[in-house]
Amino acid sequence: MGKRDKPAGRLGAAAYKDAWQEDLPPEVRNLIKRRTVDLSSAHELYKKIWNAVRSRRGAVVEEVGKERYKLAAGFFQFFMECLHDLMRFPEFQLVVVTGADLIVQALFQAGMDYGTTAPPPARGRITLWPSDRPISEAWRIFGEPRALLTHPVGIEDPGPGHELRAPISGDYEFPRLLLSIRVNGDRSKLPKFTIDLEGELVCVLMKGLYWSRDPGDLRARRNDAKRIWEAIFRELRLLVGIGHSDEGRPADLRPDAAAFLKYYNGLSWRQVAEELCPKKYTDTGHACTKQCKENFRKAVANYFKRLKQEALHLPPVTG
């Protein structure tokens, strides 16, 4: 006899538990059995919130016991997406500590959004480029190759009450992070821009991604992560040439790229300024002046001076 397919209603518990559900804390995971949620331990406030939105979702919610509800498959998947996102990136600071309260918050969000927005994307590989089109077409927006020189940027954290800053010495004193970018030039592959973060401070960012059952701890770790991210975004904007330093001088002028254009490509200082002048990002009608050219000339001179100073600080070569 042929093997019969087991009815959907009789599938084992493992078939209902997505792998990413294992990331939930026990006090939340234990209240979700297959597609049934137990809200009996939620605070009264959250029970009232659930009852308010439940009327909208009657077609996809079935009461199967006292304050226990079975969710339709599609709604259950949407609810789990909301729950997962709530614990990683909440829109407000959590003031509850019970798993049932968290579940109700996710149910509320899912109940308000389900059926009014596009369905959540399926978990899996995202098609970045049609298989029937040559990859070379993905590079058409880029145009002709242009010089791109970047250098790693270091950031250190002196501690609470202080702004993150560039390291003031080569020696380690405070927690640090190294920011760098890479751009692939292989036109046989899709364009790729990679941002690398390395160092002790990356742990602060990683810790901020994880949920904590202690609201105070959760708030502290995410505030710490926010400080680091804001510093990274400031430096990244300068690194890619779309930001402005406080002084509005050499850091904005990208002296390494200017040196390449001047001494490798043979451009004049006027051409260098027209290519890289940061004022064009804030004033589309800006026409480079003699001062723009002079700023780049001085910035490149200081760039080589700084390289020389860095070389002199290294141990002397004796053989």
Image (cartoon, rainbow, N blue to C red):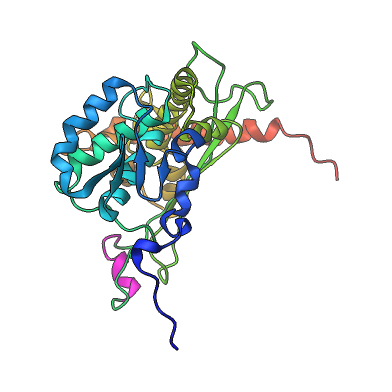
Q: Is residue 288 visible to the viewer in this orientation of the structure?
A: no
Image coordinates of residue 193 in percent, x first then y, are 41, 53
Pick out the residue farthest to the front. Answer: 65
Image coordinates of residue 264 in percent, x first then y, are 47, 53
Q: Is residue 77 visible to the viewer in this orientation of the structure?
A: yes
Image coordinates of residue 271 in percent, x first then y, are 31, 47
35 or 164, nearer to the observer? 35
Question: Which residue is at 32% across, 58% downward?
Answer: 122
The magenta stretch spans which residues?
A: 134-142
Q: Is residue 77 magenta?
A: no
Pick out the residue farthest to the top. Answer: 161
296 left or right of 264? left
227 or 55, nearer to the observer? 55
Total count of labels: 0
Question: Which residue is at 49% across, 10% downward?
Answer: 161
95 or 183, nearer to the observer? 95
Image coordinates of residue 13 in percent, x first then y, are 45, 55
The quarter holding residue 69 reads top left
Pick out the residue farthest to the bottom. Answer: 1
Q: Where 122 falls versus 206 (above or below)?
A: below
Question: Which residue is at 70% across, 30% downward?
Answer: 313
Q: Where 85 falls versus 192 (above or below)?
A: above
171 left or right of 46? right
